[in-house]
Image (cartoon, coloured by chain):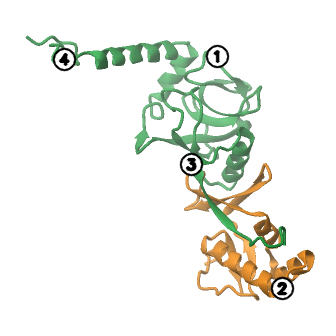
Chain colours: A green, B orange
Amino acid sequence: MPPADDKPELYAVEGGVLALSGPALREFLGAVLDRGAPFRFRARGMSMDPFIRDGDVITIVPRGARRLRAGDVIACCHPRGGHLIVHRVVANAQAGIVLRGDANDAIDGVIAGDDVLGVVSVVRRGDRRVVIGMGPERLLLARLSRKDLLRPLVACARRAVHKLHALPPNTGVTPGGETRD
Amino acid sequence: MEGEVDMDVKIGPDTVCAVSQDVVVRDIEGELIIVPLAAGVGDLEDELYTLNATGRAVWSRLDGKKSLSDIAGELAAEYDSPRNEVEADVVGLAQELVRRRIVVASG
């Protein structure tokens, strides 16, 4: 047996530490979804920040007969680069759907509905389930993204939060902005 | 129930094994990666499995037709190794694969 003195062994690999390349991940994703089963993996990249962050664990379910709507977050191959992306549907077009990463400054392009691999159903950040960006408000996020307003609004919200956190304690200013006497 | 793993099957040289329908297996850059569909979910966050080169030689022969003894015979002849030692190793690996529901056994 190859090599002669080597016993056949099965090794368990901690899935979370396995860094699969894009094509390998796409291969597994496609193979699992083709079976009608959901697929869970750790997202990498910042293109959907803050709604999906680098390191969040996302579950993708087969699209099935579901009609895709603006705001849905889907997995597919990039229309130009061919790499796996998980981005938001920002509009429906005659030839398919228009995609964009929430943090990206441009749309990805149009992809045919048949090229959608699956739809994001759950996002988990540590022990918490992330609900903002995946509920009914996703339609509004798609509209804002389409009008190039989502990124500035997120940046504005971030600045406000940072300012709030930077306030020293007992300054007389409450989080609601009211001054205490 | 069809498709259910019978954990009571005793794994021995006469057992015939086949890869379970509930796993996704891909050769990624020369490494065999096995993802069990645990509870119907393909989960890259849970444990995945891989085999060493010798394990792959066994895996490629788990076709649901050959017994473990047949497989051991083939490998012993191919690699000029003692049959009884190879058979013990093949049965040991099969037990582990069945225990983890990666492989199903019959007979």
Could you tell me how far apart the alpha carbons at marks 4 and 3 are, in whole angstroms? 41 Å
Query: Quick one: quadrant of the N terminus of chain B?
Result: bottom right
Could you tell me how far apart the alpha carbons at marks 2 and 1 are, in whole angstroms? 63 Å
Q: Amino acid at mark 3?
A: Gly
Query: Quick one: quadrant of the C terminus of chain B?
Result: bottom right
Q: Quadrant of residue B76?
A: bottom right
* Disc ID at residue A174: 4
Q: Nearer the viewer, residue A51 or B3?
A: A51
Q: Specify whether B66 is left or right of B44.
A: right
In the image, is residue A30 above or below residue B62?
Answer: above
Q: Specify whether A5 is left or right of B105.
A: right
> What residue is shown with label 3?
A16
> What residue is shown with label 2?
B83
Could you tell me how far apart the alpha carbons at marks 2 and 3 are, in whole angstroms? 39 Å
Q: Quadrant of residue B51?
A: bottom right
Residue A103 makes an appearance in the image? yes
Q: Amino acid at mark 2?
A: Arg
* Disc ID at residue B74: none
Q: Find residue A51 and report its horizontal and vertical position in percent.
A: 48, 30
**Which residue does the image show at 71% across and 87% down from the upper left?**
B12
Q: Amino acid at mark 1?
A: Ala
